[in-house]
Image: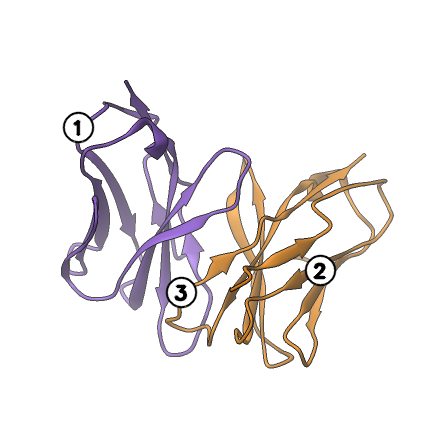
Chain colours: A orange, B purple
Amino acid sequence: KAGVTQTPRYLIKTRGQQVTLSCSPISGHRSVSWYQQTPGQGLQFLFEYFSETQRNKGNFPGRFSGRQFSNSRSEMNVSTLELGDSALYLCASSPQGGTSEAFFGQGTRLTVV
Amino acid sequence: QKEVEQNSGPLSVPEGAIASLNCTYSDRGSQSFFWYRQYSGKSPELIMSIYSNGDKEDGRFTAQLNKASQYVSLLIRDSQPSDSATYLCAVRRGGGSYIPTFGRGTSLIVHP
């Protein structure tokens, strides 16, 4: 059974640009969550999508947005990039969310210069 | 502010010893508790989940939950150098709300 796939693995962007990250969950999983991980802040929850609807949202500015498609694949977009957005962005999938266990993808390492 | 607290470490133990990792949480409504292992440069990997008070064993790993005292711990028996990693504690409310809170992790070093 294939795991969670995130693309691209690495990205370098310039301040002010926008970026789109992609996540394909485990087959059959309907919940996709996104996280930002930095050395200073640890792992922080961005948002969760379930059946194409954003079900939960963390405390991030509106520059961070996402969506989920009918096949459960999800994308995350960050507009007007700032240096502080440099981080490892992780996607996790679970069958239903809630009490279900989540499995992480390998992440996308974003560097903003 | 819902928080999950972990000692950042590093916790250093000799090979073959028991490593004890602790996590406290502030939200009394928490119902699901998870331990993830993260190797340097890799993504977190789920190693244990626990939902009710008491102990849960899986191979060399034992998770312990005490909701009254609001702590969850992970014991690693017969520690191996390959266990050297950062261990993240995650806590989540139930009721269909999926907003987990992660601790910042404890770095474990198992030396030969």
Using the image, name the chain to which the residue with label 3 belongs: A
B105 up-or-down from A24: above or below: above
User: Going by the image, does B101 lie left or right of A57?
Assistant: left
The one nearer the camera, A85 or B84, is B84
Q: Are marks 1 and 2 on the same chain?
A: no
Local secondary structure at mark 3 = loop
Placement of the C terminus of chain A among the 4 image quadrants: top right
Amino acid under disc 2 = Ser
- Residue B91, numbered circle: none
Q: Are marks 2 and 3 on the same chain?
A: yes
| Residue furthest front in the image | A1
Q: Are marks 3 and 1 on the same chain?
A: no
Alpha carbon of mark 2 to alpha carbon of mark 3: how far? 21 Å
B72 up-or-down from B76: above or below: below
Occupied quadrant, residue A53: bottom right
- The residue at the point 51 percent across, 64 percent down is A1
- The residue at the point 33 percent across, 56 percent down is B34
Amino acid under disc 1 = Ala
Q: Position of residue B42 (x, y in %)?
A: 53, 40
According to the picture, the residue beneath numbered tag 2 turns out to be A22
According to the picture, the residue beneath numbered tag 1 turns out to be B17
Amino acid under disc 3 = Glu
Of callouts 2 and 3, the N-terminal one: 2
Local secondary structure at mark 1 = loop
Using the image, name the chain to which the residue with label 2 belongs: A
Q: Residues within 10 Å of mark 2 (few under 14, many from 20)?
A: many
Using the image, name the chain to which the residue with label 1 belongs: B
